[in-house]
Image (cartoon, rainbow, N blue to C red):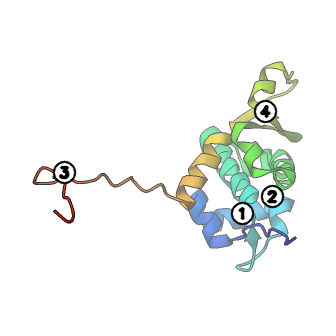
Amino acid sequence: MTEIVAIQFTQEQARTLTSVSAETVRHWRRAIPYLATKPGKAARFTFTDVVGLAATRQVISTFGVHITSVSFGINTLFQLLAEARPAALEEAMAVITTDGAAILAAADLSTKRFDSATLVIPLGPLVDRLHRQMVPILPVAEQTTLPFPPQIVRSGT
């Protein structure tokens, strides 16, 4: 039985998919140890790493927090995502605090008790957007209307 090799994205591909600049990734590498392990142009990112970059971008741009304020939580999120199956992320929520992170099923979110300020990012829309960017769905071509009515043709008569 052959082993399935996961797709690896270059830094440029990961940045393009997540709309994150090269300068921003360099800045995040200084604050997030997980990203520091992927330096330079030779860095390779898994799909879940790309989801982590997209979630980090959403946290920073939506909530306006500084990366160093949530760096421990974001680093924990990257570690959790590295262990996660991509299909499981479609119905998951990333829960980020200053001192940690969790990936929860959306249904489990209402039963979870939070004791500190918490950022919640739905991962499903991020995964869907990344899938659409990587494999665009082409419109189904409709059959054009014939300019004449169809007729039955018999052979041998």
For the C terminus, the quadrant is bottom left
The kind of secondary structure element at disc 4 is strand
Q: Are marks 2 and 1 in contact (CB under 8 Å)?
A: yes
Q: Earlier in the sequence, mark 3 or mark 1?
A: 1
Which residue in the protein does label 2 denote?
31
Residue at image mark 4: 105
The crowd level at tag 4 (other Cα within 10 Å; few <14, some 14-19, many 20+) is some
The disc, 2 or 3, on the residue closer to the chain's N-terminal end is: 2
Give how far across and how far down residue 27 sits, in percent: 72, 63
SS at mark 3? loop
Q: Are marks 3 and 1 in contact (CB under 8 Å)?
A: no
Query: Is residue 64 visible from the viewing direction of this image?
Result: no
Is 112 in front, or is 7?
7
Nearer to us of marks 3 and 1 is: 3
| Mark 2 secondary-structure assignment | helix
Q: Residues within 10 Å of mark 1 (few under 14, many from 20)?
A: some
Q: Position of residue 142 (x, y in %)?
A: 30, 51
Residue labelled with disc 3: 145
Residue 4, located in which quarter of the rendered image?
A: bottom right
Decide: few, some or many residues near mark 2? Use Cα within 10 Å; few <14, some 14-19, many ≥20: some
